[in-house]
Amino acid sequence: MKTITQKEIGQRISDLRKSKGYSQNDLAKMLDISRPSLTQIELGKRNLSVIEIKKIADFLSLSIDKLLSADFSLPELIIDEEKVDKEPKLRVSVPELKVNKFKDILLYILEKCAGKPNVGETLLYKLLYFSDFHYYELYEEHLSGAEYRKLPYGPVPQKLAYIINQMIASKQLKRIKTDYHGYPQTRYIPLSKPDLTNLNAGEKDVIDKVIDQYSDWSASAISDYSHRDMPWLATKTGEAIDYELAFYREAPYSVRNYDQNEDVL
């Protein structure tokens, strides 16, 4: 695999910026850095964080993968842009919620750890989040297909409240309000068994590892931890968290050995 140098990245950013008619001031203001700092970036003399690369890619209407690809070609990107009105742009992998599977994942997690006094709503959300994003990082496929948004207290799966209310109405779940160490806590008790035929061995293994790793954490500890995960850090508040950002994780968040041959995954 060809290694892209910092100088090449800087040149690409400069070329893209100019092709779109943006000044250095425009891009520097978006990044909240000085113009001299941007000059250093474009000259390849200043390192970029993943968050900064994500911001630049978004501003220039480009995916991170294209910006950092070994076969980057500005003329091809310009031609692609000219086709926007004729050919709708699609994400490579758009999450699509698998409602029944999501319910079984939720029931499986609760079956394993609902009896733990620390497992309230906050921790449950994080167990779902890490199950989905760990699985995507490993297999490049969606587990539940849930969309997560960056909200003030952590990544939250969309439509969860609706699904839980459905499950309560159908006697699959019970919601209870408790007090945990002086704080109000919402808990969910499973009233039915998950259909494990909806989970393959790889999916179950990822969920089991997430439960083993995080289910004994406190709500505050898991919240703080999730706020340092790259998909969360690189997303604006209120926006959907792009699953593709899982590939830019670093230790201790990454669950994939990127030194291995991709074919073994």
Image (cartoon, rainbow, N blue to C red):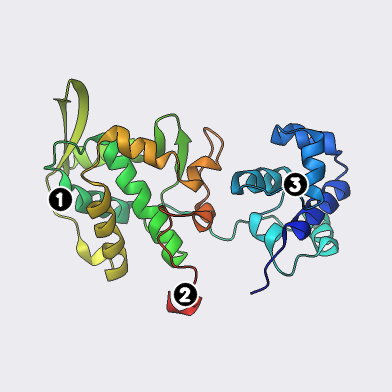
The amino acid on which the numbered mark 3 sits, given as a three-letter code, is: Leu
What is the distance, in whole Å, between disc 2 and disc 1 at their CAs? Answer: 34 Å
The mark that comes first in sequence, 3 or 2, is 3
The mark that comes first in sequence, 2 or 1, is 1
Marks 2 and 1: which is nearer the front?
A: 2
The amino acid on which the numbered mark 1 sits, given as a three-letter code, is: Glu
Callout 2: SS: loop
Q: Which residue is mark 1?
A: 111
Can residue 17 be seen from the camera position used here? yes
Judge whether 161 appears above or below 2 on screen: above
What is the distance, in whole Å, between disc 3 and disc 1 at their CAs? Answer: 46 Å
Q: Looking at the rendered structure, which numbered label has been put on residue 201?
A: none
The amino acid on which the numbered mark 2 sits, given as a three-letter code, is: Gln
Left-right relation of 168 to 244: left
The structure residue drawn at horizontal position 38% and vertical position 41%, both measured from the top left corner, is 225
Q: Looking at the rendered structure, which numbered label has been put on residue 260?
A: 2
Residue 260: give x, y in percent of width and height. Answer: 47, 75
Callout 3: SS: loop
Marks 3 and 2: which is nearer the front?
A: 2
Q: Quadrant of the N terminus?
A: bottom right
Left-right relation of 23 to 181: right
Q: Looking at the rendered structure, which numbered label has been put on residue 60?
A: 3
Residue 85: give x, y in percent of width and height. Answer: 78, 52
Judge whether 77 appears above or below 37 on screen: below
Front residue of this view, candidates 122 and 200: 122
